[in-house]
Image (cartoon, rainbow, N blue to C red):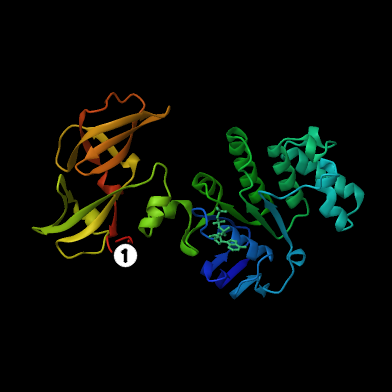
Amino acid sequence: MEVKMRNVTKQFGNFIAVDNLNLNIRDGEFIALLGPSGCGKTTTLLMLAGLYKPDAGDIAFDNRIMNNILPKDRNIGMCFQSYALYPHMTVVENIAFPLKLRRTPKDEIDKKVKEIASRFHLDHLLQRFPGQISGGQQQRVALARALVKEPGMLLLDEPLSNLDSGLRISMRAEIKKLQKELGITTVFVTHDQTEALSMCDRIAVMNKGKLQDFGTPEDLYMRPKNLFIAGFIGNPPMNFLEVSYIRENNKVVLKEEYFEISLPQNVERNYVKKQSGDKVILGIRPENMILGDEEPNTIKGEIYVVEPLGRDKLVDIIIGKNRIKIIAPQNYKGNMGDRVIVHIDLENIHLFDSIDGKSMR
Ligand code: ATP
């Protein structure tokens, strides 16, 4: 099912929860609605489900306008964080229920329920009631129930948030695999960027009701369009330093009170030109710096704190008035208070306009 949202707006009183949203979702695509709490993700999902009506704009499924179509007639499966199972029905009855409503033949119901229960590791729980299984297991039953009738679109609102971290990682893979096998258009609401990046074909990042960007995980990570996306996608987040953009003898130099970096020509030509003296924001991801010896284009700093994270170490460094974070190898030996030299991978820097926050690419 192909989904189009055209200039969709939803208000609650004077408050604009979703502001002029345009989104084209391809048939079979798995997309995430990602953003901080209150940015309008769930409101968007509920409009797709038909539980909220847009105040302006259109929603179309396969080019058919759905604004006035009831939820039950939209051919969608839903699994919300608080989606309740029928407490008086066993797990198997819960999963089979949507098929029973459709008067599916019994042997077909049995086959489909068995198949999906096995995928969601529910085989041993089929005869239990929802009150007799854990929250995480209930969530898996709700997912199985949403998918068993093979809807045209699956809507998921934080479906993994009740699961413990191990199960969440294995369910991530299961849902991703299942979504591709079924080829079902899926919209997944999450505030967890790892879930969105790891599972989805494209991610719609929202902030304060507005779409910030809609792109593949790689697009958003490698070529963030603005400071919001750059700071939101990536964990630990991108470091930002305000610098002066200076033209010197045909070269561009980024200057700050405590350092200066001369941009190689092949890097500089990726960015729009600024007036010499303009302020710009230099963005560097923690994994795009290493700690080493003094050379041209390095920055001097002092270690504020070192956080061992198991696989690597997060090193917090003071540079003048700024603090930045660097990912260092697990065997890095630096300590609090040490003076260090920071090398930047200049091929992987990001430059943003300091006024409108847009990428200068
Ligand atoms: P979260 O991750 O916290 O669930 P969200 O991005 O899903 O956030 P929404 O639930 O879509 O956010 O809410 C967007 C904004 O609209 C919030 O500020 C919320 O308080 C407001 N809002 C949502 N539903 C209603 C409602 N029924 N009445 C009034 N305001 C609402």
Whether residue 30 sits left or right of residue 323 in the image: it is right
Whether residue 93 sits left or right of residue 257 in the image: it is right
Element class at badge 1: loop
Residue 313 falls in which quadrant of the image?
A: top left
Amino acid found under the numbered disc labelled 1 = Asp
Q: Looking at this rendering, what residue extends furthest in the left direction?
A: 249
Q: Nearer the viewer, residue 33 or 197?
A: 33
Q: Indicate the position of residue 80 as horizontal and vertical percent values.
A: 67, 51
Q: Looking at this rendering, what residue extends furthest in the front direction?
A: 13
How many labels sit on residues? Answer: 1
> In the picture, which quadrant includes the N terminus?
bottom right
Q: Indicate the position of residue 51 as horizontal and vertical percent values.
A: 69, 64
Q: Indicate the position of residue 176 as horizontal and vertical percent values.
A: 61, 46
Q: Nearer the viewer, residue 29 or 278?
A: 278
Quarter of the render that holds ligand 1: bottom right
> In the picture, which quadrant includes the C terminus?
bottom left
Image position of 195 with respect to 229: above or below:
above
Q: Which residue is mark 1?
A: 356
Residue 317 falls in which quadrant of the image?
A: top left
Q: Indicate the position of residue 124 as horizontal and vertical percent values.
A: 80, 32
Residue located at (42% from left, 46% from top): 234
Q: From where the camera sits, is residue 70 visible?
A: yes
Residue located at (76% from left, 49% from top): 145
Whether residue 244 sits left or right of residue 131 in the image: it is left
Q: From where the camera sits, is residue 21 visible?
A: no
Residue located at (18% from left, 58% from top): 245
